[in-house]
Amino acid sequence: MNTTFSAIGENRTVEANEFTPEIEPQPTWCPGCGDFAVLNALKKAVSEVGRSPEEVLLVTGVGCSSKISSYFECYGFHSLHGRSLPIARAAKLANPDLLVIAAGGDGDGYGIGGNHFMHTARENHDIVYIVFNNEVFGLTKGQASPTSLKGHKSKEQPLGSAKDPIRPLSMGLAAGASYIARTAAVNPSQAKDILVEAIQHEGFSHIDFLTQCPTWNKDAKQYVPYVDVQKSEEYDFDPRNRVEAAQMMYETETALSDGKILTGRYFIDNRPSYQQEKISRGSMPKEPLAYRYTDQNYKWERSFNYVKNRHT
Amino acid sequence: MDSEIIWRIAGGSGDGIVSTSENFAKALMRSGLNIFTHRHYPSRIRGGHTYAEIRAGPSELKSRGDGYNFLLALGDSFGRNQKIDSAYYGNERIKPLTENLDDLNEGGVIVYDTGIIDIEDVPNFSELVAENNWHVYPIDLRAIAKEEGRDIMRNTAGVGATAALLEMDLSPIEALMKAAMKGPIFEQNLSILRNTHKMVSDTFEFTHDIRFPTGEHSEPQALVSGSHSIAYGALDEGCRFIAGYPMTPWTAAFTIMCGLLPDVGGISEQVEDEIAAAALAIGASHAGVKAMSGSAGGGFSLMSEPLGLAEMVEEPIVLLEAQRAGPATGMPTKTEQADLDHVLYTSQGDSTRVILAPGDPKEAYEQTRLAFQIAYGYNLPVILLYDQKLGGELRNIPVSFFDREPNPTMPGTIAESDLPNAPHHPSGKYHRYRYDAPNGVSPRSIPGQKHGRFHASGNEHTPEGHISEDPINRVIQVDRRMSKFSAIRDYIDSQDISTNTEYGPDSAPYGILTWGSNKGTIEEAIDRLNSSGDPIVKGLSVSDICPFPTQQVTSFLDSVSKTLVVEMNVTGQFQGLVKRHLGAYGDQLYGLLKYDGNPFEPAEIVAGFEEKIIGDN
Ligand SMILES: Cc1ncc(C[n+]2csc(CCOP(=O)(O)OP(=O)(O)O)c2C)c(N)n1
Ligand code: SF4
Ligand SMILES: [Mg+2]
């Protein structure tokens, strides 16, 4: 065990309430906001997998949802709008022993940070990415987001949005995410289970978490009644089959526009994570790089040898 | 007889001009000469006129020369539109000859490949030759190459011809070829080299004056570019993570790092864009690894927001900014110094970044190390601002210069063993941003350390990192972050390395002030201006752009009556910076600006000084 990062790998029993920060135990989200459900599910999931606060890095973007880093006790990093993923994935490369979770809104992840979403999924970094999908820009007061339904009205879209929503699950699949699920704030136990699976999955786990925003998306549903596609008799598909998964995602995204809430695990693939790929190619060390800086015995390479061999 | 050779090898992009010239430069260095190279190339992979210039002589060289005296014109084998004068690019095959005639000095030598270049296509060639007293040696290099090996080996034939005409010993060239090539390729090149050398020596009567100058090094030398120096500086400071997106001219340093890092158990990442690149450097650094990123000005524009984030969360990172001619895509392969304001002022809010602009490869090595020391000592972003000129120029440096100890330390990071006794919020969060930190540097903890958890936020925050808009907290945190600069100033001044370099006689009445990669060029100009007798001028080359060396610049300006400010941009950005800090001296500053994409030659500075400083009397 590493003695200079001793929070890592303690293997002790962790209680969900250890993730409640004393400094601000009560989030300042609006009453009825779906974000509370993500927070609660995350506390339960991380404690269930036995990771303690100081071995977790939670990187968020900017938005109502991204404030979760203030309400979840751990090493938190509330970064920039749309930029949680590149920060999170580099931290994971620097120290793969950390549990790295990235989180943010639908605008954050599918809009301004969409390019990072595509590439982080493609690379299959072993991190969990939670998108709080409330189909609206919450923090900036109700503008249409990439997932807003056509016709969404706001002060900026006074005549209703003329755009169709993007299809987030299908995007994750096409980009290369290896675990893709959708859950909803109204279903805490499914949400917790999915988060546990996502944490345990080795590779990029993309969770589209439906979180109602009663303040700016009033006509929007409370995401009830929901259907779990794994439990319902009506649906039969294999989430390990890419083609069937794609079909089910398409149906689910279309159903949401019609007010029907489908949730569950959509895609599970066991292709190697990015870090496994890099290690197997020798382009990443086996021992976490972060530990080297506290290793008193490490013999640091120096440029002198390269200069002598290559430049004289 | 000239005491130095300035040799240009010109051909098409993709013709192997660069590697041929680098090997020849190394051979010249091994023969005891000092080296300074300059490259010209278009933003195309195949075709387009390109040249590499090697200045070699027995005494120290700090700049490219004025013009040049030996042309090896290989012809552009990828050239399009042969013989179609009306085509947009004209006849490209002959460009390696025609495009280089303007700069060739009187009495210069021309070797051209009759296998590609039809001299009938070159307008007024014989008149020009007569006018300038050039000595022309037409040789069918292509045929010689084909006879022994392949077409492309005509570069080797050209080197053989060059060596013959300079009466240079072939052995250092052969030794390098032997080290770089194997089997039949080596055999073929070797006979091409020797055959051409013999043929030229036997066939031609030499009418030119230029011969190989003799020189000797007192110790072994290494031929390095600014980009190499930067990579080696980073390596020796323990940087083991780089993220980037290719963009000329930063790509050179990025490529070198990507080659080195797997070798030393580091990680390199080519990512989707430069926002991600800078963000990855932040993420890796946050998790405890020394990290860097970089780009040219265009990519740096995208880094603007993560740069501000690094300032706000006090994340140590080093960013390279390799300038090229802008705006927008500008001239990708041409040099300029017009990103000074960009790097100083980009990103919202009052900034807390350090900017260093090295003047030569030695400074590039030392200041890259300094950049990491400051970043990881004071927990903020440090930018190394350089340009296409410094990045690409090769110079010889004593090998012993690089014989130094590595420094992987991170003085701004707290050890886990110190965390239990460090200040914490009653809730258990570590005071990562404590008010009373000495020199404003509040040590950072690293995820995974026990008792180190805190909240990093791009929002203004309390000591434990909680988001806060409280005005009292705000002022304390802003003041603390800003207060690092006086300690950083002291730290730079305490280092025994070259940052701001004064040059020339103390008593000189006039000054030349510059920054970054013009350092060597103004020094050579100063030597020439002073060579005729009384000391006239001295120089100051500034590297610390921020924190600005106010005292040193003040005493320099105080000691002269007028100062020429030399820089490669059109708006006089550095002069503007000097005035921002030292407005009272505004009247005694005269700008000498160049923005055609090419670096200054010393003669241009001499002429500019005579016109603007002496002529103004
Ligand atoms: C570069 C940048 N542009 C715009 C903003 C303003 N902004 C903050 S959050 C946000 C949108 C939030 O929507 P979403 O990501 O869906 O999060 P939510 O608030 O709904 O949870 C915007 C536009 C910003 N902070 N940074
Ligand atoms: S505005 Fe909407 S998303 Fe934001 S806290 Fe309130 S309910 Fe939640
Ligand atoms: Mg939203």
Image (cartoon, rainbow, N blue to C red):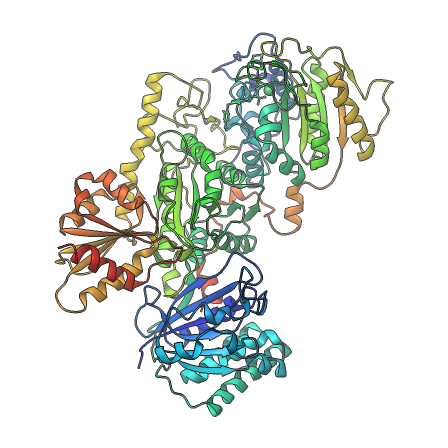
Residue B405 placed where, x, y %?
39, 55
Residue lying at the far front of the rendered structure: B86
Which quadrant: the N terminus of chain A?
Answer: top right
Residue lying at the far bottom of the rendered structure: B202
Residue B218 placed where, x, y %?
33, 73
Task: Work out whether residue B220 can be spotted.
Answer: no
Q: Is residue B206 left or right of residue A119?
A: left
Task: Work out whether residue B583 can be spotted.
Answer: yes
Q: Is residue B498 left or right of residue A40?
A: left
Q: How many marks?
A: 0
Q: Is residue A164 left or right of residue A9?
A: right
From this view, report whether residue B351 is shown above or below residue B51.
above
From this view, report whether residue B390 is shown above or below residue B298.
below
Out of A86 and B19, give the one closest to the viewer.
Answer: B19
Residue under the image location 62 percent in, 12 percent down: A217
Out of B22 and A77, give the one closest to the viewer.
Answer: B22
Residue under the image location 49 percent in, 52 percent down: B248
Residue B314 lies in quadrant: top left
Residue B486 placed where, x, y %?
26, 37
Residue A267 placed where, x, y %?
76, 31
Which quadrant: the C terminus of chain A?
Answer: bottom left
Q: Is residue B10 left or right of residue B135?
A: right
Residue under the image location 55 percent in, 22 percent down: A66
Out of A152 and B524, give the one closest to the viewer.
Answer: A152
